[in-house]
Each structure stands twice: as C-alpha cells, then as structure tokens.
Image (spheres, rainbow, N blue to C red):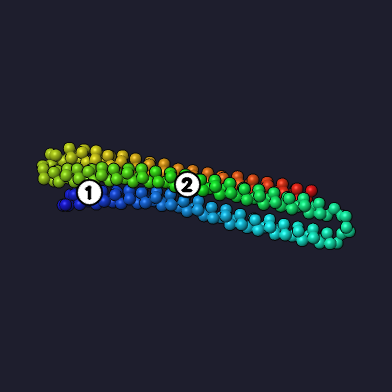
C-alpha cells in the first residue's frame, strides 16, 4: 500500500460497506413485513374475542328480556316462539362469526407462509448474488491496485493508457453495483406487494363482517 493505492483501496472498502448496508436493509425489510403480518394476525384474534363477547352479551340480554316477558305476560302468549327464533338467530350468528374469523386467520396464515417461502428464496438468492458480487469486487480491487502500482513505477508515457484502464474498471464496478441495487429494488417491491395483498384481505373481511352484522340485526328486528 502506498500513496497511490491507499485512496483507491479506501474507495473500494467504502463501496463494500454500502453493499453490506443495502443487503442488511433488504433483510430488515423482510423482517418488518413478517412482524407486520404477525401483528395483524394477533389483532384479528383479539378482534374475534371482542366481537364474540359482544354477541354473547347481546344474547344474554335477549334471554333476560324474554324471561321477563314470559313472567309478565299471560299464559298462552306466544313469547316462547319469539325467544326460540332469537336463540336460533344468535346460534347462526355465532357460527357464522366463528367461520368467518377462521377463514380470515387461515388466509393470513397462508399469506405469511407464502411470505416466509418468498423471503427464504429471496434472501438465499440475494446472499448468493452478494457473495459473487464481493468476489468480483475483490478481483476488481486487486486488478486496480495492481495497475496503480505498475503505473507508479513506470514512466509518464503510460499514464494515459492507465487512465483509460482505470476508467474501464470504475465502469465495471458501477455496472455491478447497479445490478445489485436493481435486485434489491425488486425484492423490496415484492415485499410491498405482499403487504398490500394482506391489507386488501383484511378490508374484504371487515366488509363481509359488517354485512353479516347488518343482516343479523335485520333478522332480529323482524
């Protein structure tokens, strides 16, 4: 290492650091997507428990109401028929509620499994690509340093030729780095698409649940 090669080696070291940081950023992006999916699944489970408790509370209130009605009304009044209809309605609602959340949870879990598979494949491909990139980068550094050392020991008549060769080496490195950045962008885009699909599934489920609740309220009111 000498006054000519030191700045060049420092530049290559900085480029390797940037590539390593980009690799870690992609891996962290996948981890964040996975954590978001797990948080969503936990939120769905909490929402299911909360809504089921609400349905059970409404059912208990309805039972108390019909018991009071049966006690307060004369014998032969058709209160029991209304109570049976309400009980059947609540049974259907609880069954539908459980099925809907089971389907949503299964859908989210399936999406998470797909995300894990995609992440594993993407990270493996990225690691392999980075290893190849680092190997090429190291060879490029060695070749560049060798050129600099050779040029430093020769006459100035070789300076122009060396400058041209050095420019070619720099262009090669720029091409390699662009390829890596393009690969990183594709992987981040895939992770973003997964998040959008997951959010769309949740929105569809919420719309379905609201429609079911409205239908049940209509039946109970009738």
Residue 166 image offset from top left, x and y in percent: 22, 41
Residue 14 percent across, percent down from the top left = 28, 51
Which percent across, then down, holds residue 134?
A: 27, 46
Q: Is residue 63 above or below residue 193?
A: below
* Snapshot quadrant of residue 168: top left
Residue visible at 39% across and 43% down?
121
The answer to whether any part of residue 1 appears in the image is: yes
Which residue occupies 74% across, 60% down? 61
Give the numbered dot on residue 8: 1
Determine the residue positioned at 89% across, 59% down: 74
Q: At numbered mark 2, what does the secondary structure look like: helix, strand or loop?
A: helix
- In whole angstroms, how far apart are the C-alphas of marks 2 and 1? 45 Å
Residue 111 in percent (x, y) is at 50, 45
Specify whether residue 206 is in view.
no
Left/right of residue 218 with respect to residue 196 in the rendered view? right
Q: Specify which label sits upstream in the sequence, 2 or 1.
A: 1
In the picture, measured across the screen, residue 80 lies left or right of residue 50, that is right
Circles 2 and 1: CB distance less than 8 Å? no
Element marked by disc 1: helix
Closer to us: 92 or 182 = 92
For residue 74, side relative to residue 104 (left or right): right
Q: Nearer the viewer, mark 2 or mark 1?
A: 2
Q: How many marks?
A: 2
Q: Residues within 10 Å of mark 2 (few under 14, many from 20)?
A: few
Q: Between residues 122 and 87, which one lies in front from this camera angle?
A: 87
Give the labeled residue for mark 2.
113
């Amino acid at each position: 290492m000498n006054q000519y090669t030191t700045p060049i080696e420092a530049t290559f070291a900085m480029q390797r650091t940037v590539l390593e940081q980009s690799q870690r950023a992609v891996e962290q992006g996948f981890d964040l997507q996975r954590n978001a999916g797990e948080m969503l699944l936990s939120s769905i489970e909490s929402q299911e428990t909360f809504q089921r408790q609400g349905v059970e509370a409404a059912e208990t209130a309805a039972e108390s109401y019909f018991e009071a009605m049966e006690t307060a009304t004369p014998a032969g009044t058709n209160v029991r028929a209304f109570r049976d209809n309400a009980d059947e309605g609540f049974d259907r609602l609880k069954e539908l509620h459980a099925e809907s959340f089971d389907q949503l949870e299964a859908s989210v879990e399936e999406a998470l499994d797909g995300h894990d598979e995609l992440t594993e494949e993407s990270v493996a491909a990225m690691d392999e690509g980075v290893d190849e990139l680092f190997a090429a980068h190291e060879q490029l550094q060695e070749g560049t340093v060798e050129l600099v050392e050779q040029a430093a020991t020769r006459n100035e008549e070789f300076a122009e030729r060396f400058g041209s060769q050095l420019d070619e080496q720099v262009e090669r490195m720029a091409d390699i780095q662009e390829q890596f950045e393009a690969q990183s962008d594709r992987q981040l885009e895939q992770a973003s698409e997964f998040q959008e699909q997951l959010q769309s599934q949740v929105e569809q489920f919420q719309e379905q649940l609201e429609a079911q609740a409205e239908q049940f309220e209509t039946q109970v009111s009738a």
